[in-house]
Amino acid sequence: MTLETTSRLIQTTCQPVQKHVKPHIASGPRKGHRKSRQGCVDCKRRKIKCQETLPACENCIRASLQCRYFTHSASGSTNISPCQPITLHETQIFNLTDMRLFHHYLVAAYPHLPVRNDNVWLVYITPIGHQFAFLMHALLALSASHLNKLTASGLTNVAQAHRLAAIKGLNGVLDQPITTAEQGDAILATCYALLMQSWYMDDGLPAFLIMTRSCELVTRQIRSYNVGSILAEENSESRIERMRTRLKGAPTFAVECIRASLESLNAFQPLCRQAFEQDFWTKLQDSFIALAHSPIEAYRSLLQMEKSLTELDSSEIEQLTDPCNTTTQLLMAHFVALHLMTRPICCRERKTHTVTMYGIRMDTWIGDILNQMNPEYQANLQWPLLVSQLHTAKRLESYTLVQEPQTTKAP
């Protein structure tokens, strides 16, 4: 797969998720609303209400479109001009929001993937962001989504705007030859930052799947240029070896929880009729079983699951992200539940880690799947939904891990 093909995959991560909407029959006269007379070109073309916000309306941000407004000249003629977002790349300055996001990135939101000394991102990758605007946009996008989850700061639109700018810039370089290590690391770092941002997006599951796949494909391609990229040196086996030491003393998973996960999987196994569905179901089963063996085997199995996404073709990826596909959505719900369960393992990918750092990841994804699921099959989501609810309530480890017996002091 070429970088040009991968760029089309990455571009889809900014497309809005089409949710199934039940038909609605109006019970009374239609209510009026204020007409959008100064709306952008694309909203008028699509005949939808424009928010008329600058530098770009919310509709265009969600649809990854260049927001363009009509401008009127002195002669009365109408021209179309693109509305340029106020960004670091175009103004060469930080605005106050960008400075706040950059500070949060440095102290709390900087990435750690691939598994290695976290300082690589602070002392090497971050300075590269001053040379490659798309990387800086990706870092600020990650920071905005992370901070928004922690504080409900109303930064969703800011995060989307930076993400759109990062993807637009990234797509502009993916089909060009890579000649330096810095260029390769900037591209791959952008992919990892966008992947990690998806963890904190309420509608981030499709982006998570596509960016997980893209990170692997882009890594292979950059490695083929032999430019000495630091981030591209990492592979599954090196990650496992780095984690082997970090996973010493990791907690043990409760047998009752693993048994419940397998029972939940078995309940919908007959629905998996396509070959890729059956294969994905089997890998899920193997991953849950691996939790009972050892932390390192559980980690290895999780990496194999993520790597299997690169083996799917585009039509199969589309089915995995289709909210109206009952079978794939059940698979996705259990896949997310697996990620939530393994957070006591995955949190050790960071040099300095706590399980609570992972408490804001993927917290709405299973609930969204339930809301769009055919009522006939909602019972199959009972166990993944329990995992999600405990995750949100910060009580998941009391269910998934073996609890140490409490000792009482003698009077």
Image (spheres, rainbow, N blue to C red):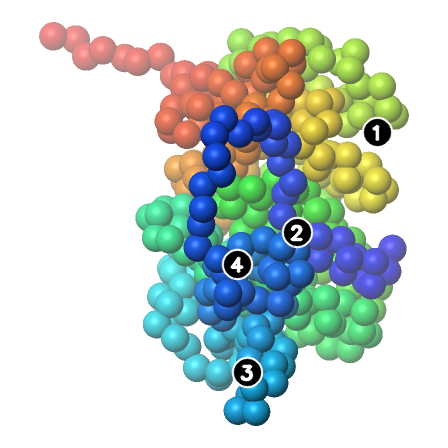
Furthest residue in direction front, as rendered: 29
Q: Amino acid at mark 4?
A: Cys
Q: Is residue 125 visible?
A: no
The reply to whether discs 3 and 1 touch (Cβ–Cβ < 8 Å) is no
Dot 1 alpha-carbon crowd within 10 angstroms: few under 14, some 14 to 19, many 20 or more: some
Where does the image place residue 8, in percent across and percent down from the top left?
A: 77, 57
Label 3 sits on residue: 72
Where does the image place residue 375, in percent across and percent down from the top left?
A: 61, 15
Q: Amino acid at mark 3?
A: His
Label 2 sits on residue: 15
Give the CA separation, mark 1 to mark 4.
40 Å
Where does the image place residue 163, in percent across and percent down from the top left?
A: 57, 60
- Nearer the camera: disc 2 or disc 1: 2
Label 4 sits on residue: 50
SS for callout 2: loop
**Res. 180 mark:** none
The reply to whether discs 1 and 4 touch (Cβ–Cβ < 8 Å) is no
- Nearer the camera: disc 1 or disc 4: 4
SS for callout 3: strand
Q: Amino acid at mark 2?
A: Gln
Give the CA separation, mark 4 to mark 3.
18 Å
Q: Amino acid at mark 1?
A: Phe
Residue beneath the point at 40% across and 63% down: 101
**Res. 276 mark:** 1
Question: Considering depth in this image, is 39 or 175 the residue closer to the camera?
Answer: 39
- Nearer the camera: disc 3 or disc 2: 3
